Image: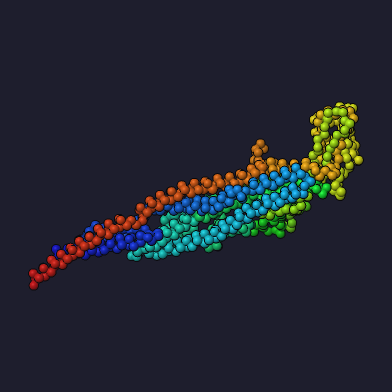
Amino acid sequence: MSFNLLNIANSGIRANSDLLQTTSKNIANVNTDGYVRERTEHTTMIDNQVGKGQTYRLLNEFAQKQLNRDTSNKTFFDQFASEANRIDTLFSQESNSVSTSINSFFNNVQEALNQPSSTVARSLVMSDAKNLLDQMDRLSGIVLEQKKVVNEQLQIFSKEANTLIENISSLNQEIVGINGTNSASDASSAYNERDKAIRDLSKLIDIETLDGPNGEKLVFMGSGEAVVMLNGTFNLFSMSADPDPNFQELRLDVNGGKAVPLDVDASKLKGKIGGLLAFRDDILVPTQNQLGQMGLAIADAFNQQNHLGMDASGQLGGDIFKIPTVGGLPYQNNTGTGSITATVEPGMGNELPASDFIITYTANPNEVSIQPIDNKGEPLGSPSLANVVAGVIDSSTVVSGESFGLQINAAGTANPGDQFQVKLSSGAAGNISLLTGRGEDLALASPIRTAANVDNTGTASISAGEVSDVTAGGFTTAPLALTNGPINIVKTANPNEYIISDNVNTTTVTITPPANNMLNQAGGAFATYGFDFNMEGTPAVGDSFTLEFNEGGFDDNRNGLKLADLQNGGLVRQNVVTSATADNHKTFNQAYAGLVTEIGVVTSQAKTNGAAFDALAQQSEAWYESLSGVNLDEEAANLLRFQQSYAASAQVLSAARSIFETLLSAAR
């Protein structure tokens, strides 16, 4: 009997010692990040011996996977909202508003109209034009700087992810080495370390895990690509930039670089890396493109209207703004020696969308496709086809589709399939400059004027005249004058018939009422002069009218009125793809307001989603910790219980020893 008691006591002491060790280990690791609490259980007593104890981790894999998923979503929106909030704050401040600068610029144009001969009023226009460009340059520079920061953070996060991937693979091999051996029960630290590495990786990207053989854990990206595989193999992240060296893209290097890298779908990434890429693609790229598009639209429209007027020096107006030219970025797979540059086709700035383009040489000689792409590089609509004529691609060379306001100059020899990325809008806001600072170069006056003969007896009046083209042949430039001299219009005795003549051409024409665009209705050389006029009312026979060069008309502000009216014109294109009946253009202020609103809405949505996923992550964390975390109250109770059990077993051992000694004494 004493021998049985001794065995029972010894096994009880060993069992309770195991329980105390496990409890002590749990208490000691209460603040250890990633530690999973353990439990030791023994089988039923057999042959007066407590069964062998087994220590295992208290882990619910479903709770763990849910926590990893919620962590990825939470860190995605945290990163996105944190980055986007800076841009939202910047653009929402009144002091940074481009609309304020645009309004100030056009308000000064209006002031100059009241005093077209005032050099001070003209100088204020040029000063505000410089302020507007500086404002756009400042905002564009901040956005560009944020893109550099994103690239730097992507480098850091991708290296961190690679370190975790290698660590998970190494721990897999360690676990495989001890799985099924007597040391397997001592491998909990390796399991904990691996689980922590997986959770840390879930903060960077969205991941899913599968159980492999021999205790391995396989890790996949949320989009399906494998990052940790069997037998210690793994794939690592790398950064590539093709064709834009400043636009880093995430790739997955397969088989140690021995296979073709996989492109990572940034739209499906979560975690910090996904949040960074979404911030760049959904905030920075559209903002930069729309700022540049607005700047190009303003500069081109103002230049073109200024061309149609007469400046304070009595000359036809020239360019006020210098519109930048950008080089096309060649793709690495290009085989030819071709190169391209691109700018806005004069007068077509209102057709330029806020997108980048891919120019591809087709199988047909000297033919290219022009494909707009969105902020993620995906095609927008159908490509246009155009011919390369004397090294130029513009609206006049388009075979199908449209030119999108681009003017492209091609050089060298490109082979079929060669591609170039054109990012005209992307950096334009910081590269538009003033070609002149002279207020005298503002062409506020119209180069033509009209008059009715004071002896006219009818009720007809002639409009002030409209200039549409100063290069069509209606003007000489040195000195500025009408090419063929004044135009005279005389009403004949026949209904609706007029004699129209100048120093070179004469025609008798019947004008179809209403008497609009009379030179165009006259046809012949008159229709090519680049200016026209309308008649209203009823002229008497013999009534005459004159259209002549506006010599000395420096107090004239008719072209200035059109310059000022650009502020209210729909000159900023909204979408690449639209219907024929849709209003696809907005004013400058509407376009900027839309940009600021879009940034605010996207940022607000990110904050809302972030708050929701933060709550989910906290809930998942609480669920996971309730199962796998150390509860000091519970462990303290266990410690007291196991201590009492240990003491009881020791008391049994003492009793067994006493009985055994009594038996020995009795036998002597």
Q: Position of residue 179 (x, y in %)?
A: 37, 62
Residue 591 figure quarter:
top right
Q: Nearer the viewer, residue 29 or 546?
A: 546
Q: Quadrant of the N terminus?
A: bottom left
- The answer to whether one can see residue 657 in this image is yes
Q: Position of residue 527 (x, y in %)?
A: 83, 39
Q: Is residue 225 left or right of residue 459?
A: left
Residue farthest bottom in this picture:
668
Q: Nearer the viewer, residue 130 or 17?
A: 130
Residue at image point 74% right, 50% down: 123
- The answer to whether one can see residue 4 in this image is no
Colour setup of the view: rainbow
Q: Position of residue 637 (x, y in %)?
A: 27, 57
Residue at image point 41% right, 61% down: 193
Q: Nearer the viewer, residue 525 or 579?
A: 525
Q: Position of residue 126 (x, y in %)?
A: 73, 50
